[in-house]
Image (spheres, helix red, strand yellow):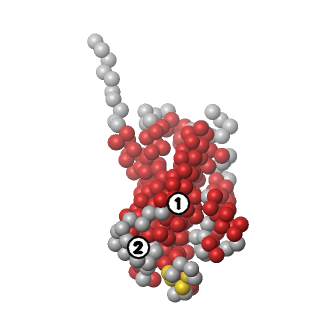
Amino acid sequence: MSARVERLPSLAVLVPWQARFSLRAFLRNPAAVFFSVLLPVLFLVLLSAIFGNQRLPGRGISVATYYVPGVAVLGIVSTTFMNLAIQTVVRRERGVLKRLRGTPLPPLAYVLGEVAASCLLALLMVAVVIAVGGLLFGVAVPGTPLTAVAIGTVVGAASFSALGLALAAAIPNEQSAPAVANAMALPLYFVSGLFFDVDRAPAWLVTVAEIFPLKHLLEVFLRAFEPGATGVPLALGDLAVVVGWGAFGVVLAARSFRWTPRGRD
């Protein structure tokens, strides 16, 4: 009599299940919600209230119109790169990942579920930022450029999720995770022009900004917010740089991702 073989659900079932679990865990963490969602919105309100009516030289838009894409990109990075790097280290060091590794859940389903959850959070974050910018400061994305915003959000979220998973492997312990993640992200926020137009900065600073994906993702969003933008105004060159960094993150994460606490295999 042959033994009955139980087949595992497919990735199409397991990935949404893992994504749902990750979203619930995120929403039950008040600190993560505040720093990933509420703080970027607070930045938008404060900066736009102070500088929003001024015109930005060289771009033909108000400062508020510049800050909406900037804070949207900030929200993408905080809900993907920052959140995923920190939470992965916490789960690894507390033995959660090790226990998951011992279950029938395929590793790929776990990783894809985490990335899917991060992409959903990023889409929600961008929608909130655009809504706040429109309701409080009159910033609008006319017509089909919203498609470019959605594409930029998904590509950016997936790429920065991969980079967050890669960074998690390099963080030695739970206590240092927030400090390391912030040390990586905060300088790039300023260098990449999220809070000021870096194109008007010294040439060497522009050169540094062009190396990293954050400025390129910002340019994708700024293209969609340009006055008179029609069709699907994608900055394909900038989007390609973001994809390239995402591929780099995938390679690093695949080679270095750890399921067990550092120093204990």
Q: Earlier in the sequence, mark 1 or mark 2?
A: 2
Q: Which residue is mark 1?
A: 238
Whether residue 224 is visible here, answered yes or no, is yes
Residue extending farthest top: 1
Q: Residue at x 39, y 44 (%)?
A: 15
Q: Are marks 1 and 2 in contact (CB under 8 Å)?
A: no
Query: 261 or 216, which lies in front?
Result: 216
Residue 213 position in % (x across, y down) = 58, 58
Query: Is residue 252 shown left or right of residue 29?
Result: right
Please tell me the numbered disc located at residue 215. none
Tell me where residue 86 appears, x and y as whole percent.
58, 53
Give the class, few, some or many, for how many residues have Cα within 10 Å of label 2's Cα (few <14, many ≥20).
Answer: some
Q: Quadrant of the C terminus?
A: top right
In the image: residue 174, left or right of residue 156:
right
Q: Residue furthest left?
A: 1
**Residue drawn 62% across the image and 49% down it:** 167
- Residue at 61% in and 75% down: 196
How many angstroms separate mark 1 from mark 2 (CA)? 17 Å
Pick whichever, 169 or 99, lies toward us: 169
Q: Quadrant of the N terminus?
A: top left
- Is 198 in front, or is 93? 198
- Residue 165 shows in this picture: no
Choose top left, top right, bottom left or bottom right for residue 6.
top left
At horizontal 54% and vertical 85% (from top left) the residue drawn is: 55
User: How would you rate the neighbour count of disc 1 (Cα within 10 Å): few for under 14, some for 14-19, many for 20 or more?
Assistant: many
Looking at the rendered structure, which numbered label has been put on residue 229?
A: 2
Q: How many marks?
A: 2
User: Mark 2 belongs to which amino acid?
Assistant: Ala
Which x, y percent locates residue 158?
A: 48, 52
